[in-house]
Amino acid sequence: MSLLVFQRLAEQRIQEAMKNGEFENLPGKGKPIQLEDLSNVPEELRLAYKVLKNAGFLPPEVELLREIKTVEDLLEHMEEEEHKVRQIRRLNYLIMKLNQIRRRPINFEKEQRYYEKIVERVEVFGSKKAKAKRLEALEEGKVPRVDFKRIEHQTVLTVMARLHARRS
């Protein structure tokens, strides 16, 4: 059987369905059809992409972009520096992972962020609350403990900011 036979059969069934009014109450009647632009996807992969999309699967790049956006939103609302530093490290890791997946020239890579912003916002001795607690402890005569973890974070941030400044 040739393809022409199938075309004639399909056309005949469509005409019968139209006569019987089977196309009258379809959902979306009178509205424009929303076609997806798959022109940038190779022809042999289009069906697979459509099946995966309909099943709710996303390409790894899109999943990473969503996760990056979530971490960025989280960072905007965080107040404690220690948590911010942890999230910045996570954000930079995700961006690095995204850049590796994309395999694009380095000048098109997504930039790792927040070095300058965090260095600007983080005070040398921590947050205002932490400063107030240290002052209270000093007034009470308590000997301050050295917070090596905080010093390490501040050193890392300073070094990262300097490296970033050199790259720019």
Image (cartoon, rainbow, N blue to C red):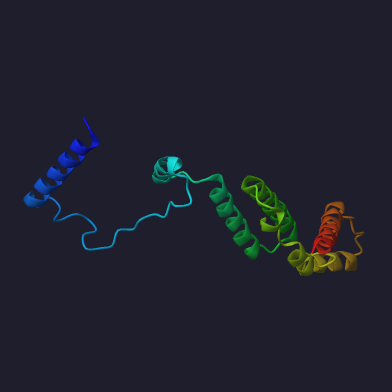
| Quarter of image, res 133 | bottom right
Kindly identify the residue that appears in the image at 34 percent across and 58 percent down.
34
Name the foreground residue: 14 vs 28.
14
Counting from the top left corner in percent of width and height, residue 157 is at 81, 59
Counting from the top left corner in percent of width and height, residue 74 is at 61, 59
Q: Is residue 25 left or right of residue 119?
A: left
Name the foreground residue: 39 vs 82.
39
Counting from the top left corner in percent of width and height, residue 76 is at 64, 65
Q: Quadrant of the N terminus?
A: top left
Kindly identify the residue that appears in the image at 46 percent across and 43 percent down.
57
Q: In this view, does 22 lie to the left or right of 61?
A: left
Kindly identify the residue that appears in the image at 61 percent across and 55 percent down.
68
| Quarter of image, res 134 | bottom right
Q: Is residue 139 left or right of residue 106?
A: right
Kindly identify the residue that appears in the image at 81 percent across and 62 percent down.
161
Please count the marks in the image: 0
**Placement of 70 over or under 117, stated as above or below:** above
**Placement of 43 over or under 150, stated as above or below:** above
| Quarter of image, res 72 | bottom right
Q: Quadrant of the C terminus?
A: bottom right
Counting from the top left corner in percent of width and height, residue 43 is at 43, 44
* Residue farthest left in this picture: 20
**Placement of 98 over or under 76, stated as above or below:** above
* Residue farthest top in this picture: 1
**Placement of 50 over or under 140, stated as above or below:** above
